Image (cartoon, rainbow, N blue to C red):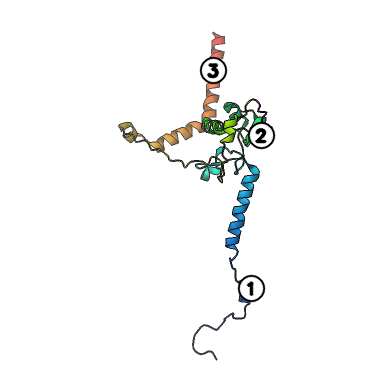
Amino acid sequence: MVRHNNVVPNGHFHKWWARHVVTWFNQPGRKVRRRKARAAKAAATFPRPVAGALRPKVRAQTVRYNTKSRLGRGFTLEELKEAGIPAKVAATIGIAVDHRRKNKSLESLQDNVKRLKEYKSKLVLFPRKAGKPKKGDSSRDECATATQDTGAVLMPLAAEKPELEMVAVTADMKNFNAYQKLRVERANARIVGLRKKRAEEAAAKAKEAAKMK
């Protein structure tokens, strides 16, 4: 019988605990299986890169993440044009194309054009038929010495290191009132329509006065 002011016994000791035990004895075997699958994929895709098509450098969405870069879906038609690669040819040489994405800044355009040109300089094009190379195909020596890119990502993005520019604090910087400047510009933006209307009315009155003379 329960005595004194203690916790009422409420032990759950009739569970089938063995049913909820999770083991991981298959981990070594899974590791071997994954490695063999990667090797088989590399052999099947040779000489193409294992990671697949080349992806562009884009900015992540929303204000929270747009300071970070990541790999996007595909290159824009404008980027391919600047790099001198036809859009229909790009898909055949391992370059992803996204006809919906638009370039919103010159910086992103230049970064991706540079990325395309770097890829193009490293590209080794094998002829469709051995012994019958066409224009644009690599030479026999280049094909013989070509190696496969087995990385998880083709041309991964390098970590960005922002550079801080040190400047001397001037008297103008010290005397500048940022809050006052923001309020003035906010007021200017709010009454821009009123000022335009007044200017038009003044011009109309001046025109009428000129006619009366």
Q: Position of residue 161 (x, y in %)?
A: 43, 40
Q: Amino acid at mark 2?
A: Thr
Up-down relation of residue 27 to residue 204 (above or below): below
Examine the residues drawn in magenta and state their main secondary structure. Answer: loop
- Which residue occupies the foreground of this view, 12 or 213? 12
Residue 16 found in image quarter? bottom right
Please name the residue that numbered disc 1 is placed on.
19
Q: Residue at x 53, y 15 (%)?
A: 206
Up-down relation of residue 136 to residue 158 (above or below): above
The numbered dot on residue 6 is: none
- Which residue occupies the foreground of this view, 173 or 32? 32
- Which residue occupies the foreground of this view, 3 or 51? 51
Find the residue positioned furthest to the top: 213
Between the C-alphas of marks 2 and 3, the distance is 63 Å
SS at mark 2 in the image: helix
Q: Residue at x 34, y 36 (%)?
A: 166
Between the C-alphas of marks 2 and 1, the distance is 52 Å
Magenta residues (range) = 130-134
Please name the residue that numbered disc 3 is placed on.
203
Q: Residue at x 53, y 19 (%)?
A: 202
Q: Position of residue 24 (x, y in %)?
A: 58, 65
- Which residue occupies the foreground of this view, 61 or 36? 36
Q: Is residue 99 visible?
A: no
SS at mark 1 in the image: helix
Left or right, 70 with respect to 99, comes to: left
Between the C-alphas of marks 3 and 1, the distance is 88 Å
Please name the residue that numbered disc 2 is placed on.
92
